[in-house]
Image (cartoon, rainbow, N blue to C red):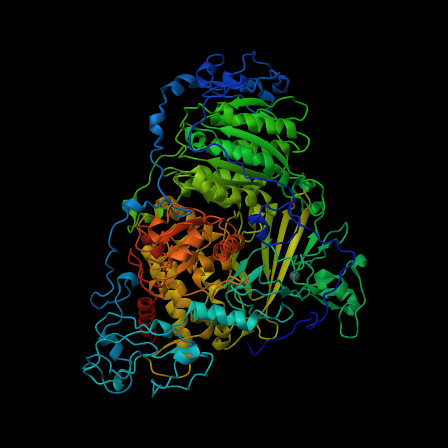
Amino acid sequence: MSVNQQTHTGPPYGQPQPGYQGYQQPAYGGQPLPGVPHSQYGVYNGPMPGYQQPVPPQGSVRAPSTSGTSLSSGHLGYSPFGQGDVQNGIPASTAPMQRPPASQPFLPGSAPVPVSQTSMLQQYGPPPASVQQLSNHMAGMTIGSTSTSAPPPAGLGYGAPRPPTMPGPPLPVQTAAGPPTSQPNHVSSPPPPPSTLSGPYPGPPMSGLRGPPPPTHPPQPGYQMQQNGSFEQVRGPQTNYGGAYPGTPNYGSQPGPPPPPKRLDPDSIPSPQLNELPPQQKPRHRIDPDAIPSPIQVIEDDRSNRGSEPFVTGVRGQVPPLVTTNFLVKDQGNASPRYIRCTSYNIPCTSDMAKQSQVPLAAVIKPLATLPPDETLPYLVDHGESGPVRCNRCKAYMCPFMQFIEGGRRFQCCFCSCVTEVPPHYFQHLDHTGKRVDFYDRPELSLGSYEFLATVDYCKNNKFPSPPAFIFMIDVSYNAVKSGLVRLICEELKSLLDYLPREGNMEESAIRVGFVTYNKVLHFYNVKSSLAQPQMMVVSDVADMFVPLLDGFLVNVNESRTVIISLLDQIPEMFADTRETETVFGPVIQAGLEALKAAECAGKLFIFHTSLPIAEAPGKLKNRDDKKLINTDKEKTLFQPQTSFYNNLAKDCVAQGCCVDLFLFPNQYLDVATLGIVTYQTGGSIYKYAYFQLETDQDRFLNDLRRDVQKEVGFDAVMRVRTSTGIRATDFFGAFFMSNTTDVEMAGLDCDKTITVEFKHDDKLSEDSGALLQCALLYTSCAGQRRLRIHNLSLNCCTQLADLYRNCETDTLINYLAKYAYRGVLNSPVKTVRDALINQCAQILACYRKNCASPSSAGQLILPECMKLLPVYLNCVLKSDVLQPGLEVTTDDRAYIRQLVTSMDVAETNVFFYPRLLPVTKADVDSDSLPAAIRNSEERLSKGDIYLLENGLNIFVWVGVNVQQGLIQNLFGVSSFSQISSTLNTLPVLENPFSKKVRSIIDMLQVQRSRYMKLIIVKQEDKLEMLFKQFLVEDKSLTGGASYVDFLCHMHKEIRQLLS
Ligand SMILES: [Zn+2]
């Protein structure tokens, strides 16, 4: 806890939360319980009884329908129009072209959707410049070219590992090579050689030291350097820091002050006291893994220390509990850590200090974060016609830190010091302490987070927005149809459309919906409520996309329900026999964008796409995947888009408020780096299901889709972060677009998206006034209401580096560093990025050592308490697939992960980089609690136990070879280990306590994550275990990633070099 904490003017601790009568509390989304965290998704929220997941036919192409819809057989269809407007499987209308598409009659009793000739619809867009004869082209297509061969077995959520191709034995890792010279990549860098070690140690030279440690010493707690450059881990009972850490009797002459008995402050890891050991016993020094900082211990300590009391935000610069701790937040003037977390809550007063420490000053902001049910959503404040009260100069919004003066007639801005008149309608008297008497009645004066109702001045073109629209755009090419995907999506949408986001108590969602299907041409559907049947309009001129209908394309679900259901029933039939394998992609987004433009609203496109868009069209791509580029200077090109087309398109989308969510189902490379650009820059989400198979992947996909459709989202959003004098926001990371240096623009921003903002000094700060942040997000709610969400946070400032290090948050630091590095790979060789990360962290730790730690032997590694996990977590970032690809990781996987991480919050990056490993056989079946997690190392696994490992994208169930037969029977319903099928992607539902407990733990984990995790069963010594082992991040990785112990040694060496 910082010594210079100060209370601000907010309500004191324990003060009851004001009631704010008269302020509405907006509710978000279509969720019956606003603010409920993800949990409702697991069970598909909403009161719909009997809602079931449709189980469409699996895996194969449907047989042609025998009903009247058989007219849709593809080969019949082409001839009448022959202009690309009809193709495989699309029922061709036999009616002649008619001008207004809406007047196209639909044949009663016959499913085919009438086709309108697009070129007739010139009023909606430019006429097609060239209409191609597609039928010939189509006829030339062969299904054989689709490469849909043999779907692979279970893989990672984002990848497609193929166990059969896994190499047998683990690759040897070159960590024990000769002494490193300068700063090589840590992976190939061995631990410090003896010569490096000997220098800094006080006492007798140890160059002659050789031989094992004396028998009386092992296993020594603590940290011992290995002379010959290799390490071995000493097994021992898991011990607490208190016991195993420095200060233990074994470490007799430890320099410096004795550490406190319980906590490590400073957290010092003793280095080997080599001089005390007999020379002949030196060579096999060992590091006890139990004696190096344990993430599990830190997490557990924080839980027990901070989990029981609410986190009250009234105090400036308070470091919140860790993201892994369950705690309640009470807003008393600063934004909840669910909205903003900082790398440090105590900022150096000067730029020089900040540079010296190398600690990045950053805030991870999640403006629309979901709150637990027992926390209060931001109140909605209406300042009337003149809009929110703001500072005249810097335009900061009214907040708890503004100072009212002159009897309340003016206020001085806490950000820029400018004095502004209080508008007459906002005037209020001050009490004897200078506080407005309505202080507790106004959220914007007493709370850290609240919303303002925006006036028309805050709207595009000075016009209040229309409610947003959702457009579902379904790839109906051969792969999509054959896998059963098209049918699955259509079935699901029938029910899901009843769960569109709703505002507060509104009866129904204001969101309108539209439908498009596509392969190499686009099919628009008129689903106007007055129609008996939906109508299809085909646009084959994809070079100049336009929307062939306005009226009837975007509709209210309830009004058009019958027509929509009919359409969703027909789509799978219409394309059942398609042979079209090629797709377009750019025109699909363009079509959605044009539709929103025409409707003058913002919205979201849900695109379900299967393949590299190689059909002739704008945004056409080629397969440029090349794994040989890995570890070369050209590796960065794998992360860059292959064309600027999508960047330009993204810009147009942002201008319109068109957010793009992308669901990808690739069977091969489809260039996520390029296809994902629009999603990324519009604030959308990307999901990837490689080798999608209905039976194994449908649950995951449907859960993701449901959550994605239902979640709270704002549109046409602009975020600006204001700061008090002395610092300013200089850099931004996340899924957004920026057209200037201050405004973060997002076509859509949902409750899961995070923006990380970095700050730099532009002047001195003062300890007295501290530093303030105000994040203002202007957005359109799902009902079309324009609002401003404001989050305020006050931080301390320090003149002593020790205060900085005492108030850091390593999880947030890692979130920032990962995003920084993941952006770096776009422009620099991956090795350069990794080396820079290591160097920065070494500087951070060296600065602490030099300026803050108690004097001690230079041979000791001393880590600041708040950063003692920095090395282990940093190593996980370095070993992640983006910076060091694993064996089976594809280029698309890496691009996908890169994009995902960029929008992750701190909790997500925490579990993604250091997965949670739970011994479920140790779980108490009678309790609701989770078993205590263990460290991610193979040697922590017992052959007789079963474990769960989750990282936010996957859940592994690891089964040891010696697990009792009874447990296997209870969990898998089979009688022996050998009978367990590793192709299961769900656990059987068995009526026994153990099965129930494990399944309930899995459910619990699923609802905590923003994506549905893929379940993978791993049997010990089975092939899939290789995959699993990549997630045991404290161990050496198969592709050369250092073990935690090795990396810690490497960091130690780096630090010592910086200090010498
Ligand atoms: Zn100001």
* Quarter residue 393 falls in: bottom right
Residue toward you, 351 or 873: 873
Percent position (x, y) of residue 617? 43, 28
Relative vertical location of residue 148 with respect to residue 301 in this rendering, above or below: above
Percent position (x, y) of residue 47? 65, 44
Visible in this render: residue 111? yes
Percent position (x, y) of residue 730? 51, 58
Percent position (x, y) of residue 83? 47, 17
Relative vertical location of residue 376 with respect to residue 685 in this rendering, above or below: below
Relative vertical location of residue 476 with respect to residue 283 in this rendering, above or below: above
* Quarter residue 284 falls in: bottom left
- Compared across the picture, whether 642 is left or right of 126 comes to left
Residue plotted at (58% across, 70% down): 317
- Compared across the picture, whether 362 is left or right of 8 comes to left
Residue toward you, 558 or 444: 558
Quarter placement of the N terminus: bottom right
Residue plotted at (26% across, 82% down): 274
Ligand 1's quadrant is bottom right
- Compared across the picture, whether 206 is left or right of 718 comes to left
Visible in this render: residue 955? no
